[in-house]
Amino acid sequence: MTNSMSNVEFVKALIIQHVRPHVIDIIDQHQIGFEVDQNEIHLLLLALKNAGWIQMSYLSAIDWPGENKFEVVYVLFNWDKPVYVQLRTKIDRTNPVIDSIIQIYPGAKYYERECHEFFGIAFPGNPDHHKQLILEQWDDIPPLRKDFDPKAYSDRKFPQRTYTEDYSLSNSESTKVEKRKLRKQRAESLKGGKKQ
Amino acid sequence: MKSTKFSLATKLSKAEVDRKWWEIGDFFRRNSLWMLMYCTGCCAIELPPAMTSAYDMERLGMGPMATPRQADILLVSGYLSLKTLRRLIYTYEQMSEPRYVVALGSCPINGGIYHDSHAVINQLDQYIPVDVYVAGCMPNTESVMNGFVDLMGQIKNKQANGWKKYHENFDWYKANQITSLGEVDVHDEFHE
Amino acid sequence: MRQMKLFLGPQHPGMHGNASVHLFVDGDIIKRSYLLPGMLHRGFEKAMERKLWVNNISLIPRVCVPEPDINEMAYAQGAEKLLKLEIPERAHWIRMIMLELARISAHLMSYGGLGGPTGHYTLMYHAHADRNSILDIFEKISGARVYHQYIVIGGVRQDLPKGIEKDINAFLDDLESRYIEYRDLGIENPSVIARIKDTIMLPEEVVWELGVTGIGMRSAVGKPYDLRKVMPYARYDQVEFEVPTSTYSDARSRVDIKLKELVQSISIIRQCLKKMPEGPVRVKPSRGQSMRWKVPKGYVYSPVESSRGEFGYYMVSDGGINPYRIGVRGASYPQGLLGIEKYMPGTRIDDCALWVDTMGICSPEIDR
Amino acid sequence: MTIVNVLLGVGVAFFGFVLQTSIAGINRKVIARLQKRQGPRWYQEFLDIFKLLSKRSVSHGWIFDFGVIMALGGIIATAMFMPLTSTFSPFGASDNFFIFVYLLAVGMLGMAMSASGSGNPWASIGVMRALTTMLAYEVPFLVVVLTIIKLTGSSSLSAIQLFQQTSGNNWFIIALPIGGIVGFLALMGMLGKKPFETYIAPGEIASGPMVEYGGKQLGMLFIMHEITVFIEVSLFVHLFLGGAHNILEFLLKYFVVYTFANLISNVNGRFKIDQVVKFYYKWPLIMAVFQAVIAIYFGWVI
């Protein structure tokens, strides 16, 4: 336990050596999170990569419309010193731009594309970041932003099934049996198969 | 006095002859249903048990087919995102007639667990006609098999005529497709 | 040079799942290729924000269909980390049994899937027959064949049914007795070896470039980089198991490692059944509170070793009753998207389906 | 060549279709048992074919339709020459081995033409692979058959059968054991059985040449395929297994050969196309030449 705790301490020392993080939260002996400035991200990623955090596990964003910010998250992992490092940085929401990290972690290419598609964050430096990946012919604001309402979108675009009969049993007691009979009848009528 | 037993039936009209031939065809069609393996969604995970040794679909004369041209059943296995629906419509229109559609799971019926999703359609029979729905999330392999047996019964009773409906109401179906999809045929500009 | 564009999928018997690989071929050789994902996009991350912490338990298994339990585990584990919740001892062991059974089922499915691209359908039929008996065991334990919703926040939904040990042991014995047969049928079979040996290479530097995890990484790097070993969750530190590795990663060695892991999983389940203590299996929120279960503020990344690699949930809570943001890191993201774009060119059309199969690419978790 | 011969020939082709379709159905049941399942009804193949003929079909231009008819016609024409036993042959002594080799190619080319006419790239790849495989297995097979023709002194199938049935002579699979193995390997390639089934390959090229066929055209191709299999297996029976004295013996040998090939096919994966060509040009060709040398120059025939 002491050994693995010292891994977290090691990361903390490494980060503090370079920058002063706004927030440090130690989640457990295998995970630590830092919140840093936007312009420090590349420096820290490079430092962490040189220190052995060679795997980029996850890249995504969180929308904070209240603060008018996007929070971009990088999760890194080192297989020899098993610590997950979360680096978070807040960027402006109205004009979200953050430099791409594919020079440092080439595997981030598609994460950035996805992030652009779902949040609208631009990643200059990534040659394909503006191309569509998962959605096709999308005609609304990026869907993972908090002000996007999927229910309204779905109601607007897709026809809903309308039910002509009401089978809920919450009404008065006397109609219960009748309704059940009706429901059974309808179920019978829907049945295909050999019985008919 | 002619014997009634072996006398030839009176001359059948052309429509009746056609009907007889159609019934003979139906016998073959329902006993040899080939399905198109298009895993549109998660219900496809219950198909391997149905196809392989556990439930052995081949007993019923069914089997997976590689391409839409060869297949009789379009098996819509689960939810349909918009992107899949486009390809599903191409696929459906490629299949040779008579063609049947079996939809597995709750999602093609009314959206199921994804009823409020921005990417998943709510009701499949607005876009293409569906012959058999198998409800459940996910439906058991037994109910999947039962769905196929139901389809066979429907073919026997001449109820499985979704493909005729598609011809008759083609404009209605196309209009619905365009409302939801914008454009049905898109050039795939990904990476280009 | 004239190139022909081919669509391998979404409707193609060689593709596992609803994804499409677009190939530009010259003769039989692939010159350029890319994956077209998104056919399975359901907007999970958005849907989870709109539901309660408890409701999401029914939604998450659907993220990755062949192996749903890892989703439940990653989600439950992450929420417990945020809640600082200690779950009962027995629940840990039951979770491990479920996870390892799911791993066996996923490996069997993937090994059977080798039968598709190589045309060896007997292998596929045998593997799926065995997988079906795991599904029956799952049905006995949780009531559902595929989507169990069994691992929940605070433990597992209910205790194991009585006498299930006998079923599990019988199945494991059965599987173990036919392990040699499986090897002979599949990867020791000369005609299959001709297809999978020395093709579809994954060198070590590519692993680090793409960020491949799981079997792909272990087969190339030769070190036991398995999250169950490196940072044990549940009670993986109290069971003994080996992590099979190799330093030469072709399709055959990856499948080989898959089979060896299957043996390790069998041994883990046996140990779990032996060491499992008695006791409660779930911490419940106080009565009437489950719909209003608030999770404290925080950010957590919760990784789990799936059959394809590191599978993680990035979870953010703002202290409310809904998750603020849940991000899913699919294990097949790097090799599925960047891997196909960069390293599939140069192989043949025949290898394409095998690439998808042996790299362990699961399209629903790419699309979510 | 009278009208009786023609009628007999058509009868043989029809008999071949019924025989092969039934045996294929029974084989599907046998294979199902190998795969731990129950399997379809034995007449399932008939249902499949008649169902396909009952469906509506899509055309992709006249080459597409004409190619199918040409393939079916070519194959029926080939089957008309096939002797069933050593004494029954529809066209008497015209059952020359080379007639089969050349007429089989007509059917194959018809299919290739039609599949290319569909315009689907998978079909072109499949056709390319089918013709490459054909080139690969024909060479060792022809070397072995030429050895047999040299030994018998005749290229008529009836004569070859009678030669093997004459007392003192063995079946050629015993007389020329290495050649027999080569012949069987070539048969596997001809039938499109598993290690060499590169041109259908559903998991790779989406059933290759058949990708655009549906309905009636596919039905005709299935009939063509059944008759082709009948011709190929019968060739093997007549050339290597001593033919048949009567029809029952023929049926038995036919069933054994086809089932054996099918069983081998179902415990194997499939090769890549380049591996198929390399395979046939390596061991079978060397073995065939070796067999020819020792049989013809040294006279070592068992």
Image (spheres, rainbow, N blue to C red):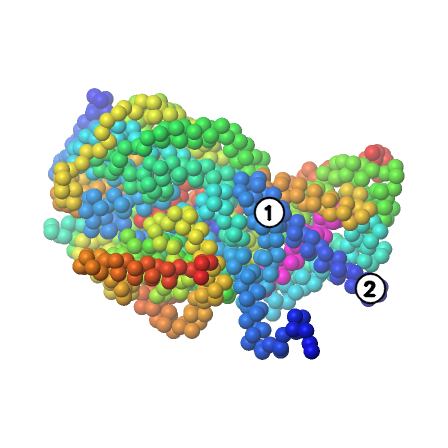
Drawn side of residue C233 relative to residue C116, left or right: left
**In this orientation, does residue D145 appear?**
no
**In this orientation, does residue C101 appear?**
yes
Picture coordinates of residue B87, whole percent (x, y): 41, 60
Picture coordinates of residue D248, whole percent (x, y): 76, 47
Drawn side of residue D6 relative to residue D277, left or right: right
Quadrant for the N terminus of chain A, please.
top left
Residue range in magenta is: D214-238
Disc 2 on helix, strand or loop?
A: helix
Chain letter of disc 2 in the image? D
Disc 1 on helix, strand or loop?
A: helix
Q: Main secondary structure of the magenta part?
A: helix
Number of marks in picture: 2
Chain letter of disc 1 in the image? D
Against C111, is C322 above or below?
below
Q: Which residue is mark 1?
A: D28
For the point 34% across and 51% down, the residue is B136
Looking at the rendered structure, which numbered label has been put on residue D4? 2
For the point 19% across and 47% down, the residue is C52
Picture coordinates of residue B159, whole percent (x, y): 45, 65
Camera-nearest residue between C88 and C166: C166
Picture coordinates of residue D260, whole percent (x, y): 66, 41
Against D49, is A67 above or below?
above
Alpha-carbon distance for marks 1 and 2? 36 Å
Q: Amino acid at mark 1?
A: Arg
Label 1 environment density (alpha carbons within 10 Å; few <14, some 14–19, many ≥20): many
Query: Is C6 one of the magenta-colored residues?
Result: no
Q: Earlier in the sequence, mark 1 or mark 2?
A: 2
Against A127, is D168 above or below?
above
Quarter of the rendering containing residue D212: bottom right
Looking at the rendered structure, which numbered label has been put on residue B158? none
